[in-house]
Amino acid sequence: MDFLTLDWGGVALAIVFAVLFFGLGLGLSYFFLLAMLVFLVLSAIVTYIDLHYKKRLGIGQDPRGVKNVLANGLPPLIMAFLFYYFSKTGNGTLALLTVIGFLASVAAITADKFNSEIGVLSRDKPSMIFTMKKVKKGTSGAISLLGTAAGLIGALMIALMAVLIAMRLSLFHSAYPFGIERAVGAITIAGFAGSFVDSLLGYYEEQGIGNKYTSNFLCGMFAGFAAMLIFIIL
């Protein structure tokens, strides 16, 4: 259970979420579950990279609980609900867009996890996103070159899962006039941008406004709707 970095409360809620994803996913139920599982596994992997060093810095991660599951899981779940609604009402175009939004929200929380867990391993101190002042590692709102690059890779890894949908149902060719390449691009850009939104909100966390849970939630929601817009514009 430690491998998945969730405590028992987090595991219980994650199971509830899995049931909801399965029920809302219709023909894409297994895909929705797979995307969330990939996020969970990737998060665990980057969390445990050089964990002893992180703990020496005082930023080692304890098992994540209900609040973490809610903050990271609600944005994709909202997108899954919208997919269900639009599918049931016969609006294939909007249903497709919400699938892109779903993947982008997962890409954003994955990018944010890569950013923070790998960025802290940078040799140099990170810089505060607004002031660019050097701060200690683990400070909310701080960014580093290594963390930024890792976040982009994390977003791209999730975005590439869109290929599975194209192979499975050919959605990107039959239900909307844009190809899979643009979908992957929109998801990557929005997911990467979402991680920056999290960093921006992290700056305000340091000022006593909001917390990591609200930042994670807004990061995912921003990316989901941004990806839909970007996909339409491209």
Image (cartoon, rainbow, N blue to C red):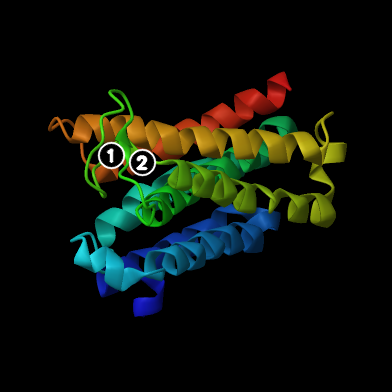
Tell me the quadrant of the picture where the N terminus can be found.
bottom left
- For the residue labelled by badge 1, is the local secondary structure a helix, a strand or a loop? helix
> Residue at point 84% right, 28% down?
177
Residue 152 location (% of width, % of height): 56, 43
**Front in this rendered view, residue 28 or 118:** 118
| Mark 1–mark 2 CB contact (< 8 Å) | yes
- For the residues labelled 1 and 2, the Cα–Cα distance comes to 5 Å
Residue 211 falls left or right of residue 113? left
Residue 133 location (% of width, % of height): 26, 29
Which labelled disc corresponds to residue 214?
A: 1
* Mark 1 residue type: Thr
Tell me the residue that label 2 is attached to: 217
Q: Is residue 28 visible?
A: yes
**Front in this rendered view, residue 55 or 102:** 55
Residue 125 location (% of width, % of height): 30, 44
Q: Is residue 61 visible?
A: no
* Mark 2 residue type: Phe
> Residue at point 61% right, 54% down?
25
Residue 180 location (% of width, % of height): 80, 41
> Residue at point 34% right, 53% down?
120
Q: Residues within 10 Å of mark 2 (few under 14, many from 20)?
A: many
Res 131 quadrant in image = top left
